Image (tube, grey):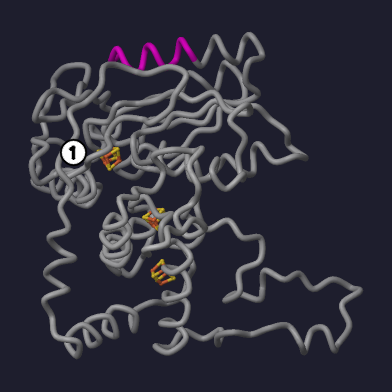
Amino acid sequence: MSDRKKKLRTVARRKLKEGGVDCFVGYQQPINNLFSPPLIAENLNDLERLTVNPLSVGNLSLYLPDLTEEENNQKVGVVVKGCDSRTLNVLLQEDVLKRENLFIVGLPCKGILDPSKLREFCREGEISTEEFLSADFSWGGDKVVGHLEEKEFEIPKENNLLPKCRDCDYPNPIDCDVRLGSEVEPGEKNFDRVEEIEDFSLEERWEYWERMFDRCIRCYACRSICPLCYCESCKVDPRDIPITEDTTPEEKANRPEWIEKVPNLCSNLFFHILRIVHTAGRCVGCGECERACPMDIPLTELSQKLEKEVRKFDYVPGLDAEEDQFLTDYKEEE
Ligand code: SF4
Ligand code: SF4
Ligand code: SF4
């Protein structure tokens, strides 16, 4: 068992046993996908499944608003990587979370493996998917090591990390109560792909995004997985406005329908423009929206473009929970 996993389980066990938290949100061993799914541990038995490894892909801050909201009123332990920690700070900044309800275990992050690359790795045959799913993983310099009972295998980090991890400049959790291991050297952020698209002509850019968003089936997975998309009722999806037995026919008829239910280019563009504008100055580039998209739409190209623009104002979202929000604070010269 890796040192990080051992330390995590010890800390989580102590907090749950002492009643310091009501539940602990972390990751568990992969089950049938090549990443570690989330685990919400409510008792010591659940903690037997708790793990942390280079497959801990999800941004767990997604689950915190529901778990800590007034009627649940739970104190929650959570594991965060650098990017997740920045999301958590945005949620604190926006008063969606309260710091006193959280016990934060920070994971200085050495990068997360890209599940799509791992599928290729398993297909190439060095190890089977079944072996992969039963391995214990640890980070080792420029590679990830998979430990099986009778053998070990190595996956080079180069070309196998998630795109967002290849130039990550905030790998360390910003704020935590316990840190798992020593700090990691930050990388240097680049916006190469954004700059490639910026070089397109206006017509080429329009054609490119039309092509991308024409594929969107409006499943809203990108919205559901984004920890920062937490409005109870979404303008683009009137199903969020409940119809009860007391709803009158007039109220039903007057429910706002900003876009058509059936996916089509015009409505898809409306949804995506609305979504991306709502994340301006807040999106931390965790990449979850793109990971969730079943149509492989490169959503982070848009969020990266916004981040590039926001950084021109010396602002990086999620670095300080006490700071004013980007779009609510103006300087005269802006
Ligand atoms: S973006 Fe940075 S902090 Fe987030 S998973 Fe990748 S390396 Fe870790
Ligand atoms: S918009 Fe995408 S990249 Fe940005 S915070 Fe939400 S899920 Fe993460
Ligand atoms: S996840 Fe992909 S297909 Fe689904 S709504 Fe978002 S962009 Fe469209």
Q: Name the image quarter holding residue 212.
A: bottom left
Q: Is residue 193 magenta?
A: no
Magenta stretch: give its range: 1-11
The one of 28 and 290 positioned closer to us in this rendering: 290
Q: Position of residue 334 (x, y in %)?
A: 37, 64
255 to 234, vertically: above or below: below
Q: Which residue is mark 1?
A: 128
Q: Residue at x 84, y 71 (%)?
A: 244
> Farthest right residue?
246
Number of marks in picture: 1
The one of 37 and 3 positioned closer to us in this rendering: 3
Mark 1 Cα within 10 Å, few/some/many (few <14, many 20+)? few
Q: Position of residue 53 (x, y in %)?
A: 30, 28
Instruction: Specify the quarter for ligand 3.
Output: bottom left
Q: Amino acid at mark 1?
A: Ser
157 to 141, vertically: above or below: below
Q: Residue at x 61, y 20 (%)?
A: 43
The one of 333 and 89 positioned closer to us in this rendering: 333
**Residue 58 located left or right of residue 162:** right
> Farthest front residue?
332
**Residue 175 located left or right of residue 191:** right
Q: Which is the main secondary structure of the residues drawn in magenta?
A: helix
149 to 115, vertically: above or below: above
Q: Position of residue 323 (x, y in %)?
A: 48, 42
Quarter of the picture holding the N terminus: top left
94 to 140, vertically: above or below: below
Q: Residue at x 19, y 90 (%)?
A: 203
Q: Position of residue 52 (x, y in %)?
A: 35, 26
